[in-house]
Amino acid sequence: MKKIVDYRKFLGVNEAAELSELKSVYRTLMKNWHPDKFNDNHDLKLEAEEKSKYIIEAYHFLVSIAPETRAQSINEYVETTTASAIADFEYKSQVLQITFLDGNIYEYFDVPKSVYVKLVNADSPGRFARRHIYNEFVYRSTSRLVATA
């Protein structure tokens, strides 16, 4: 997905980056681009505010899809995807968002439109998703993002 690639490129990390590396890069960039460093120059302060917002967004996004983060919540993910039915799903720009009856919401990235069309037309969307989506695409929990925001 372009968003993932752009964030990794912006932070200067690859897909194997661990949480500690992401945190280190994040802190370094925030030190360099913190708006308070530019109190004497209004234009640079505005630029720093925009950059720092983007740094924060990129960092939080990459942390949410990091293998370590997913490993910490794998039991909850497996429980939801095996025991809870799909309440709703939405597809936009190769991102499939699935809402489960237990209240969990997951986003799946780089899902081809053809897979989404097959999901829509499947006799059992849950069975189709278990076979072709849940373990095939990079995902993150968005219900956790909403709960902590």
Image: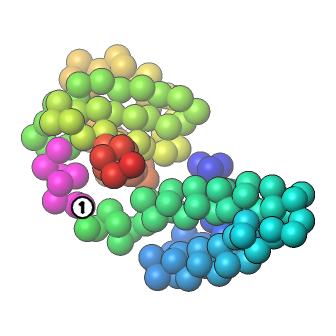
Point out residue 27 in the picture as x, y percentages from the top left corner. 59, 78
Q: Residue furthest left?
A: 83
How many labels sit on residues?
1
Point out residue 68 in the picture as x, y percentages from the top left corner. 35, 72
Residue in front for this viewpoint, 103 or 132:
103
How is the structure coloured here? rainbow
Q: Residue at x 72, y 70 (%)?
A: 36
Q: Is residue 123 left or right of residue 54?
A: left
Q: Residue at x 89, y 57 (%)?
A: 43
Residue in front for this viewpoint, 63 or 46:
46
Q: Residue at x 44, y 35 (%)?
A: 96
Q: Is residue 76 magenta?
A: yes
The answer to whether residue 93 is visible is yes
Displayed quadrant of residue 14: bottom right
| Residue 75 vertical position relative to residue 140 in the rendered view, above or below | below
Q: Residue furthest front?
A: 40
| Residue 129 vertical position relative to residue 87 in the rendered view, above or below | below
Point out residue 40 in the picture as x, y percentages from the top left corner. 87, 69
For label 1, the residue is 73
Point out residue 83 in the picture as x, y percentages from the top left corner. 10, 40
Q: Residue at x 32, y 63 (%)?
A: 70
Q: Main secondary structure of the magenta part?
A: helix
Residue in front for this viewpoint, 91 or 145:
145
Local crowd size for mark 1, using a 10 Å CA cut-off: few (<14), some (14–19), many (≥20) = few
Q: Amino acid at mark 1?
A: Ser
| Residue 122 vertical position relative to residue 41 in the rendered view, above or below | above
Q: Is residue 56 left or right of residue 6?
A: left
Q: Is residue 82 magenta?
A: no
What SS does tag 1 mark?
Answer: loop
Magenta segment boundaries in residue numbering: 73-80
Q: Is residue 125 left or right of residue 139?
A: left
Displayed quadrant of residue 66: bottom left
